[in-house]
Image (spheres, rainbow, N blue to C red):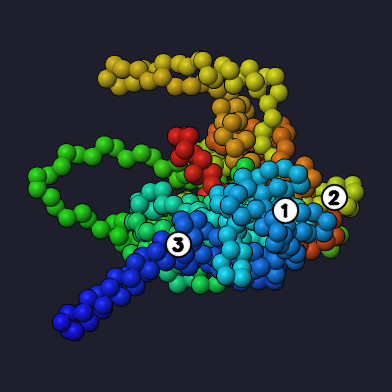
Amino acid sequence: MGAVRGTASFASISLVLLLMALLHAQGTAPAAPLTLVSRDGRRPLATTIVNGQELVALEDLAALFLFDVREDTLAGGLTVVYRGQSIVMSPGQPMALVRGRVVPLPAAPVRSGARWLVPLDFISRALAPIHDTRIELRRESRLLLVGDIRVPRVTARIDAPGPPTRATIEVAPAAPVTITTEAGRLIARIDADGLDLSGPIEGAGLIEGIRAGEQPRTVAVLLTARAGAAMAVAGETGGVTRITVEVTAPAADAAAPAPPREPAPPPPAPATRPPLQTIVLDPGHGGDDAGVRGARGTAEKDVTLAVARRVRTLIETRLGVRVILTRGDDRAVGLDERAAIANNSKADLFLSLHANAAPSADLAGAEVFHLRLDREGEDARRAAESEAVALPVLGGATRTIDVMRWDLAQVRHVDASAALAAVLDEQLRAQVPMGSQALRQAPLRVLTSVNMPAALVEMGYLTNEDQERQLGSEAFQSSLAQGIYNAVLRFRLYLEEHRVS
């Protein structure tokens, strides 16, 4: 009988312990801490789960935000006081009185031993309105931002597995971005105090994945072993910085024959023509025509040729697009001849490079021009949209073609040219100083006769002493070339989206 009583007693104790454990699990449990981010750095802020609600200790908040907590032992109320402003709460009441206004809370304050716990939303709903420091709670990412700091939200996605594999990284609100290439990855370094980065993105195609970089405030695009060239361009639209990533397959992979399949597939449809196959770069002036010459002797013709060569190298090596220079050395080329080179090459884009001059030595900054039509040009544009000529061809059929004067060839491309100019302005602005009115229209003769989207870039003022020094330096010329290359890449995406050929 003693053994039976002992067994029963042990069973009862075990049952009581089990019930206590279950009640504790239903009542209080630790939660993943918040990360408080401020100018002083990062630190964890502990929270706990009570009856399904996430709570934080009021004394921990008081130490961080320097407020006083006063407890009315008779009435059982709590008052938070910060610089003459107060928050009043009562146990059992899921609300707070803030500046005389009732603010609902998801749970009432509760006592846990000697500590008072308040719901997490107390921070944003009650404390933030009375505090003189900016406080922002981001529950989803477990962040508590304090002070005037920049922690943009960063999201990423893979748009197309390809090849080429395309991905997009968005930074909101917009922030400056620097992109570098390391072994097997692209690194986007974002100028901010911290990043609110969504979870890692699984890979597809030639991208192995997108995740937080090893260094603070960086995002890494990891490439597979089969990846070839990788390019990334950052631009700002609507207050969001958008990083467009494109990863191509190596040339050997692209040329490798596909393994035979049974049964043989039907012949594929004709491939869509790539939107950019040939680009003409027009280095302004040349030969006896030196263009503008700065006080230090820097000649416009030398600057335009140097930058054009750098742009050609970037485009040919990174995009594999054919690039033609209207002049490859120091020689004179007429305006009509420059247009003829572009038209006879059936180029998809024409870009003329120049350096500027002004009576005032204070003017500085790059500018981008696209064609402005006069009344005759507008009439020609409307006519081009409605008129065509049918010509006979071999076999008895006819072919419909547009007919237009050579000196008005540009009119059909004015919308695409305006888009090109806008992209140039956006991308150059991220690389070099821009003028006060950087995006402009003008009836420039060199643009009038080219039968493709076209723009002209004035890269800076040689009549400005500081800018002349910049335009003559290799570093500044490389920045100009990078901005133009980035614009070409973005414009190619524009053409693909708008199906312009």
The kind of residue tagged 2 is Leu
The kind of residue tagged 1 is Ile
Marks 1 and 3 in Cβ contact (< 8 Å) = no
Q: Position of residue 7 (x, y in %)?
A: 20, 79
Q: Earlier in the sequence, mark 1 or mark 3?
A: 3
Q: Which residue is mark 1?
A: 87
Marks 2 and 1, Cα distance to the nearest angstrom? 56 Å
The kind of residue tagged 3 is Gly
Looking at the image, which is closer to me, 454 or 40?
40
Residue pictured at 52% horizontal, 58% vertical: 54
Looking at the image, which is closer to me, 268 or 242?
242
Q: Earlier in the sequence, mark 3 or mark 2?
A: 3
Marks 1 and 3, Cα distance to the nearest angstrom? 26 Å
The number of discs equals: 3
Residue 27: assigned label: 3
Q: Quadrant of the C terminus?
A: top left
Judge from the rendering whether residue 428 lies leftward or rightward of residue 313; answer left or right.
right
Q: Residues within 10 Å of mark 2 (few under 14, many from 20)?
A: some
Looking at the rendered image, the disc whose residue lies closer to the viewer, 3 or 2, is: 3
Residue pictured at 64% horizontal, 56% vertical: 123
Judge from the rendering whether residue 391 lies leftward or rightward of residue 359; answer left or right.
left
Marks 3 and 2 in Cβ contact (< 8 Å) = no
Splitting the image into 4 quarters, where does residue 184 fall?
A: bottom left
Looking at the image, which is closer to me, 24 or 367?
24
Q: Earlier in the sequence, mark 2 or mark 1?
A: 1
Q: Is residue 329 shown above or below 368?
A: below
Dot 3: what SS?
helix
Q: Which residue is mark 2?
A: 363
Residue pictured at 22% horizontal, 76% vertical: 8
Q: Position of residue 378 (x, y in %)?
A: 65, 20
Residue found at the very far left of the displayed protein? 263
Looking at the image, which is closer to me, 325 or 242?
242
